Amino acid sequence: MTEKSYSVGMSNHLQFVERAGVLLEMIGMPRLSGRVLGALLCAPPGGHTAAEVAALLQASRAGVGSALKHLTMMGLIEHAPSPGERADRFRMRPGAWAELTEQGNRKLNTFVQLAEEGLRALPRGGDPAPLQEMGAFYRLWLDLFPQVLAQWHALNRRPE
């Protein structure tokens, strides 16, 4: 089935939600978690209940519940206050993207260490260029990222 035939009759909103699922699946996230994230990215300010997301996605409540738990544990979404309402509501967590990237960056030092270890272990005749490139790239990334993050936070200051 082609993407064009797949999307015939779907609203732009649902096409976006499905595309989010496919793209996030390509980077290792379960497709349903990606679809749920897509739905919450477009949610009204109060967020959605699990039942609302399940209805929108035409997915099982159990599957949506698992996806909501997964996204909550990742720190991308949060419970939204809903006074007087029995069902939990979920919404995107402010600042989630910067925090997620910052967490990932802490892991990138592993590549710098691996490059350094590889250079020390390089056999005679081995080409050091790939290891040097990997180390240099991640050292630069790790050096520049704090500046990017500081600029991001400066641009997105919220009134207290």
Image: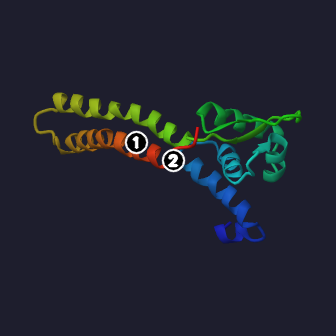
- How much space separates mark 2 and mark 1, taking CA atoms? 10 Å
Depth check: give the residue in front, 64 or 41: 41
In the displayed structure, 47 sits above or below 108; it is below
In the rendered structure, are the residues bearing label 2 and label 1 in contact, judged by CB atoms less than 8 Å apart? Answer: no
Q: In the rendered image, which quarter is residue 159 located in?
A: top right
Q: Amino acid at mark 1?
A: Ala
Which colouring convention does the figure follow?
A: rainbow
Q: Secondary structure at mark 1?
A: helix
**Residue 102 x, y percent position in the rendering:** 45, 36
Q: What residue do we see at 37% from left, 35% from top? A: 108
Q: In the rendered image, which quarter is residue 127 located in?
A: top left
Disc 1 designates what residue? 150
Q: Secondary structure at mark 2?
A: loop
Q: What residue do we see at 29% from left, 39% from top? A: 143
Q: Quadrant of the N terminus?
A: bottom right
Left or right of 108, for residue 56: right
**Residue 160 x, y percent position in the rendering:** 58, 37
Residue lying at the far front in this picture: please name it.
160
Disc 2 designates what residue? 156
Q: What residue do we see at 17% from left, 32% from top? A: 122
Q: What residue do we see at 40% from left, 36% from top? A: 105
Residue lying at the far left in this picture: please name it.
124
Q: Amino acid at mark 2?
A: Asn
In the displayed structure, 2 sits above or below 78; it is below
Depth check: give the residue in front, 84 or 117: 84
**Residue 120 x, y percent position in the rendering:** 17, 28
Q: Mark 2 packing: few (<14 Cα in 10 Å), some, or many (20+)?
A: few
Left or right of 61, for residue 115: left
Depth check: give the residue in front, 129 or 43: 43
